[in-house]
Image (tube, rainbow, N blue to C red):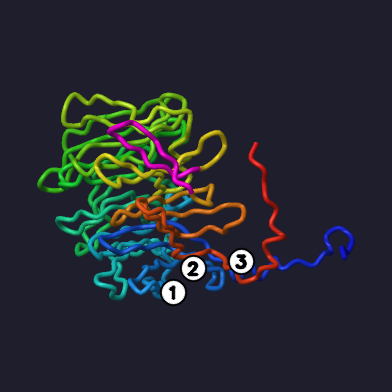
Amino acid sequence: MAETLPYGSWRSPITSDLIVGETIGLGAVLVDGKDIYWIESRPGEGGRNVLVRHDSDGEPLDLTPPPFNARTRVHEYGGGAVAIGRGLIYFSNFADQRLYWQIGGGAPEAVTPAPEPTGSGWRYADGCIDREDGHWIGVREEHTSERSVINTLVAVDPRAGTPGQVLAQGCDFYAAPRLSPDGKQLVWLNWNHPHMPWVSTELWLARIKDDGSLAEPKRVAGGPRESICQPEWTPDGGLVFVSDRSGWWNLYRCDTAGDGAIRALCPRDAEFGRAHWVFGQSTYAFLTLERIACAYNEAGRGRLGILDLTRGSLTPVDLPYIDFGSVKVIAGRVVCLAGSPSEPPAVIAIDIESGATEVLRRSAEIDENPDLRRYLSMPQHL
């Protein structure tokens, strides 16, 4: 028999302890070789961000020991705090904003200088790892005693103990430095005040010289009325990025080896990118040279699809989720963050050929309480 109670006084299994104490934040899915990683934000540990590896036995393994906290404050919004390559891990530590590295699962070691007593110091984000020498290449934000902030692209030699070698400077903001497969070229994004990155950004490309500096920088795309996000190198050394030049964030490819021509890969009234609030966002990844797994939003609904470049076709994957992010590919599977009104955010792995989906980590275990789901309000798509 139904019971009527005054507003706000009904009893619910959705308690503050469930929301605050038993729910974790999930973010930044990363892959390296055959290994899958993600970052967990844990309220029970004071909000500490921990890098976790999905082991072969299916159990998560913490890689960030207490009291370290893998979180950066670059641009204040953060993101892109961890970079991984061939088992080598770099991360920004929240307490001192220094860059640390871990070799072979060992203890973290600081590779950049400590902040000055005056508060001057450096912050690091959105890095990639040079496979040739193990250097970290990413965004450095310098805070001076005069309270000014200077953003640059730098290369950090982990054994030098310096703030890093400046590669690009002069713009107000930088993001998304990405090395070509052969390690000989670097692309990145930059923009300037008063623009926000979803209004105006530029995509640049340069050759890497023997001494690690950049040569022959050239603007590939972007400008005052174009927003670009997530430049990525294709397996064969081509360059793909997301641009809103059509009015929609669509995927494009640039012929960097030829005349620099840019062509749309899937013209569509849909968004294949996201506003650049934080570093390290990923909405697509290459399954093969001719197939891209991509998250997109069309007619107000989020989907995950497979873009076949030979046919120009986009095929949605049938999944019980409507929000996708941090899309990566490993061994023929798509690994990403996914959620829906009835499913809490989770790290999932999808076998594209069979359609089988494996949940690697949930942010909340609502299935343990069968009475809980009837309290969830299901939205209607309009």
Q: Which residue is mark 2?
A: 48
Q: Amino acid at mark 2?
A: Arg
Residue 155 circle label: none
- Asked if marks 3 and 2 touch (Cβ < 8 Å), the reply is no
- Residue 130: name its quadrant: bottom left
Residue 115 in view: no
Residue placed under numbered mark 3 in the picture: 366
Residue at 50%, 60% (x, y): give it.
Answer: 346
Q: Amino acid at mark 1?
A: Pro
> Is the residue 67 above or below the residue 171 in the image?
below
Q: Residues within 10 Å of mark 2 (few under 14, many from 20)?
A: many
Q: Is residue 311 magenta?
A: yes
Pointer 3 or 2: first along the chain: 2
First of labels 1, 3 by sequence position: 1
Cα distance, mark 1 to mark 2?
8 Å
Which label number is shown at residue 67? 1
- Asked if the residue at tag 2 contacts the one at tag 1, i.e. Cβ–Cβ closer than 8 Å, the answer is yes
Q: Give percent across and percent down for residue 132.
A: 14, 55
Establish if 300 lies above or below 105. Answer: above
Q: Residue 249's spot in the image, x, y percent? A: 43, 32
Image quadrant where residue 72 sits:
bottom left
Q: Secondary structure at mark 1?
A: loop
